Image: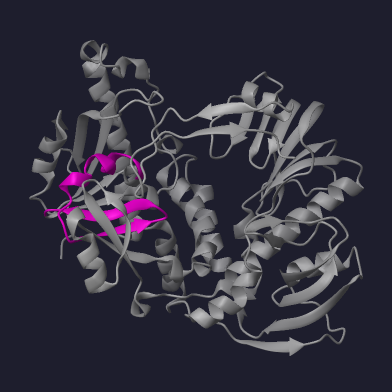
Amino acid sequence: MARRKIVVIDCETDPFEYGTDIQPFIWGAVEENGDRHLFYETKDLIDFLKPNKFIVYAHNGGKFDYHFLLDYIEAFEPVMIINGRLAKFKIGQCEFRDSYNIFPLPLAAYKKIEFDYSKMKRENRDKHMKEIIDYLFADCDYLLEIVLNFIDGFGLNLTLAGSSMKQWNKLNDAPAPQTSEEYYREFSPYYYGGRVQPFVTGIFKGDHKIYDINSAYPYAMLNPHPYGGVWERLSGYDNEPIVGMNFYKIIGESIGILPFRDENSLIFPNDKEYRTFYISGHELILYKKYTNKFEILEVRNCLSFTDFKEYIYKWYELKNQSPKGSTDYIFAKLMMNSLYGKFGANPDKYKEFEVIPNDCVLAHEADTGADFAGMLGDKALMSLPLPDTKKRYYDVATAASITGFVRAYLYESILKIQESGSQVLYCDTDSVIIKGNADALDIGDELGQWDCEGEFDSVAIAGKKLYSLRCTNGKFKTASKGVRLTPKEIYSVANGNEETWKNIAPTFSLKRDTFYQQRRIKKLA
């Protein structure tokens, strides 16, 4: 059976300005056969798409473009929402998807034309309309290339993570084993994210460098990890060798190595206090090198495991054989890094959604047990827990072991740098900012080796994912997750001042009206 025709859409709006009402003034649609359509009214776009069995993609549509279409979604229509993003819905015969779920990068990571957005101001746009239309269709063309290449390689899958799991299953000629909710609850205490930590804050002069681990998670996946859910629980400890794939519940001295959840925040305490830790064997092996002040209370001994070498090397070879920046290159990198997280997914967080008339909420709650979840345009969004028959628990222990391996590998490298006499100022999952030499690191191009990402003569560190470094050529490398601060503002915060950040782009939310964010930013204490 032939698949539905693919169409991509995009819109242009007034340039973002804090507090203004943003509306599209032009829409472009490009069919996979190359036919192009231009619309100056949203209604005209919908009239074109609605009667056709197209699958339509917009990049970041679930957080932007599609919020201009909400009033056209019919009542009692199911919608899919992933991480607050409108991922899939229908208007008439037409299905809409957010391409960010298969390409979780800015479009500019592939191709993007530079454009002066002041030309889109209401008073300017008429005299620049041809240039605006060319820019609009260029974005559509680039997105269409991405979407079609993804479909050709992976099929009509909704998400990148789901595609990576299907690729893994295909390679093994068997589906990944599933576990249960009880299993997830037993092993999820051992599952943490990456280590993000400023060791100092402030402004620092002199020669500094950033080093990254080449493909940290894929490198970890070359090693054996729990797989299949077969374990034995051991109480106590009789001096058996510590095994990286096992998990350990211990009471021990906090010396900065082990992860700890503190009111839902991941920290790495270094105050010599004794705490109960739930950790992978990878981290315990490192910890034991630096202290014997701990007691193992319980061991979960892994009896079934695998490595992911064949999967990782398949995509690693494709990446190396592909031109940098090509869709093959980008999707190979994404495939290498997407699989492990699928093992750690918690379907208890997933819900089913539908939209209903706003005046039907109370009756619908009484009839179905659904909860009011927000507004979708002029209609109410209702949610129900995902039915047990649709829940898919994979092996969270697999994800916990992989992430534990990376945290241990990163921090072991940090300790080696410090022991060599150099200083580590900051780390973020797979990278470090250091002052001094990196002789302690294994430098190279292979998986798991370290690569120098830049040299800098000044560093400002204000907190987690909030730093700016001045390159030796005068340019800046910055990170400011959740906000967009200039290097000057980050240096100001790192120097102890507060800065006010106003997001010039509106935030489209499923739980409240469109709003503009504003925050006071100050240095991490």
Q: Quadrant of residue 407?
A: bottom right
- Say which residue appears at 75% left-offset and 60% top-offset: 408
Q: Position of residue 85 (x, y in %)?
A: 37, 51
Q: Position of residue 65 (x, y in %)?
A: 29, 39
Horizontally, is 486 left or right of 284 in the view?
left
Q: Nearer the viewer, residue 342 or 274?
A: 274
Q: Position of residue 135 (x, y in %)?
A: 29, 25
- Say which residue appears at 48% left-offset and 69% top-offset: 346
Residue 307 in sight from this viewpoint? no
In the depicted structure, whether residue 197 falls above or below residue 351: above
In the image, is residue 159 part of the stretch drawn in magenta? no
Residue range corresponding to the magenta coloring:
63-92
Q: Quadrant of residue 522?
A: top right
Q: Quadrant of residue 485?
A: top right
Q: Position of residue 424 (x, y in %)?
A: 81, 42
In the depicted structure, whether residue 299 falls above or below residue 415: below
